Image: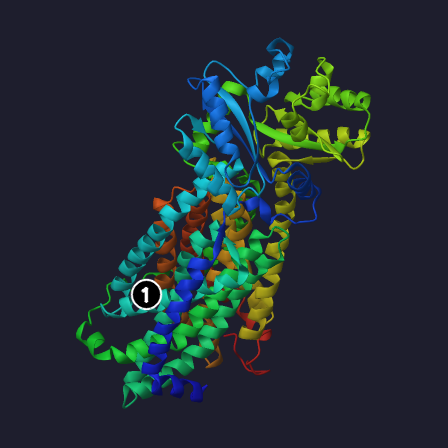
Amino acid sequence: MQKFSNFVVKNKMIILLISLLMLIPSIIGYSLTKTNYDILVYLPSDIETLKGQNILKDDFGMGAFSVSLVDNRVSEKELVELENKIRNIDCVTNVVSINDITGTTIPLEMIPKKLLDHVSNNNSKLLLITFETGTSDEETTNAVKTIEELSDDIKVGGMSAMSLDMQNLVESQTFAYVAVAVIFCLIVLMLSLDSYIVPLLLLGNIGLSILFNMGTNIMFGEISYITKAIAAVLQLGVTTDFSIFLYHKYEAAKKNKKTNDEAMSEAINETMVSVVGSSLTTIAGFLALCTMKFGLGKDIGLVMAKGVIFGVLTVLTVYPSLLLIFDKLIQKTKHKALIPKFRFIKPVVMKGYKWIFIVFLILMLPAYLSQKNTEVYYKLDTSIPDDYNYSIVSKKLKEDYGLISQSMILIDSNIENRKINKMIDEIEGTDGIDSVISSNLFYKYGISNDILPSKIKNLLETDKYKLILVNSKYEIATDELNEQISKLNTIIKKYDKNAILAGEGPLMNDLVEITAIDFKNVNYVSIGVIFIIMFFVLKSLSLPILLVLSIEFAIFINMGVPYWHGTSMPFVSSIVIGTIQLGATIDYAILLTTKYLEERKNGKNKEEAVGEALTSSVSSIFVSAMCFFAATFAVFAISKIDMIGSLCLLMSRGAIISMLVVMFVVPSVLLMFDKIITKTTLGFKKGEKVYE
């Protein structure tokens, strides 16, 4: 380690120059990394619903589809011209309207009323547009954008339109997220550090590590829009304390060393051990997300774990170089730190630790039950503002046509029409079903296969499959729809054991089932991995249990707040927040506990050891937590994307709650369990009186 620190100090200019040059490939990599705006693609590829999606894409040319609205002021001739223009757009495979259903061979009177009511009314006509490529593929969203630009009289709906709106939202807000996070964090650092230049150098260093991280995401090909939106802010929040720790070590070492280089070499040595050990719990927390079956966990986990690693590397190389190069300017801009000393915490804890511990025990159960009963929602379109195109179209489709959620049944084309009709009758008899559309519907009303337009036949039939469209009265991702989907699956399997129910509703049902399991598994994994790391860092059997339990208490409170407010949170937040909060804030508890152990092993009694730990650690914990809070709360305050805003609110609130738990509950736990801790932790000599 000494050789490494000497190398950094000796080559500070070269390190800084190389780091700046590395920005070039990082920026290029960042610009070339694709962003995925469809969360459903992260579902496991082997589930039946996604197999159905592949059949729709390969056999029906329906990688994605859109139900769009055309204003009724558009004449029949203009509608035909508009359809032809849409068909000529790249990746559009089919366009179907009322004109295509009637054509020149089918009188309007022959069309079933239940079908007519779902394709036109006094205000508009519907267009069903299918695309060759997937819902959120660049080709599809570009096609949607082109369609919308053809005329003001057409409004495109569907998941691809939602992806396009989400893309526009994320692109318009990502820079703002980073900007407000930096500004809020800068304010905290200006108040808490003793120089006006150091916060700028600190944030500049973290900015480099963020760009290195985001640039290397090109190795994954693409990342989700959620990861893209929060990665920089989250990396800023969880790695700021590494830089603060090194700066304090450097300033302390300067008092005992002849030169700044010697002081920095010592600071790097001391920081390396602490920061590397501390970062392991954060990295482990993020990597635990990779155990999820839902691929979004892996997407967030790998990017953020990599970000923490880059944060550690730049803190040990680039940041020391910056501090040494700008040392004279740092000294000229010194000022008194303005954060409080928190002297009141020590007497409060030392006098009332038994009462604090009792309150901790009393609140543990209601905190656990509250978070367990907090409602979670899965509706993805809640992140789209009401004034965006997708939301406007969805509202009109719901109000004017009763189109709320659609599913698609894929059934063997060799199944007899008699059986299919019987199956459709059962489906129509299921609670909440609004309509069922299939080629059999036309046959039933005397429209034979010979006169049915080819566009309709190609849409509803292939050599292998028949496609049946089912419209439900229930909203996507609700308990009612999920129960209905279960009933539909039971019905269709009676007539064809290989039948598949596909579409957004069934996909969301799979999402609910898979993430419910993921939520439990990822929490168990993160707790287990962090427990093991803490066992080796603290060399104790009891402390990992006590500290993890304390932070889990903070997590329970954080996740239980929506329950008491009568609100709900998005499913992504419910899955990842526990792991993120545990991994990012357990460091606060480790910092305080390490100092307690050090003082205890030096012969001080438990009260003196805990008191000294509080005195030396509270300010560092406060600054670290406030930086995490400032960065994430700032994003919550301006975010128009509900999923991003909710997650950042949980992280910001979690930082404050964890901070308070570490300042008050953890010291109380250490005092209450001191005897057990000293017996189960390495470094205490047998027979030595350490309990007095």
Within 10 Å of the Cα at label 1, are there few (<14), some (14-19), or many (20+) other Cα atoms?
many
Task: Look at 61% across and 12% down and name the residue there.
Answer: 113
Q: Is residue 113 left or right of residue 318?
A: right
Q: Is residue 431 above or below residue 54?
A: above
Q: Secondary structure at mark 1?
A: helix
Q: Is 621 in front, or is 460?
A: 460
* Residue 617 visible here: no
Q: Is 476 in front, or is 45?
A: 45
* Residue 13 visible here: yes
Q: Residue furthest left?
A: 332
Q: How is colour applied across the structure in the image?
A: rainbow
Q: Is residue 146 above or below residue 238?
A: above
Q: Residue furthest top?
A: 109
Write down the quadrant of residue 623 in the picture.
Answer: bottom left
Task: Look at 20% across and 75% down and name the residue there.
Answer: 329
Identify the residue position indicated by label 1 in the image.
Answer: 203
Task: Look at 80% across and 32% down and name the residue there.
Answer: 496
Amino acid bearing label 1: Leu
Residue 336 pos. (x, y %)? 21, 68
Write down the quadrant of residue 185 in the picture.
Answer: bottom left
Residue 247 pos. (x, y %)? 32, 74
Q: Is 412 in front, or is 83?
A: 83
Task: Look at 41% across and 63% down and name the residue there.
Answer: 28
Residue 372 pos. (x, y %)? 57, 44
Q: Is residue 560 left or right of residue 323?
A: right
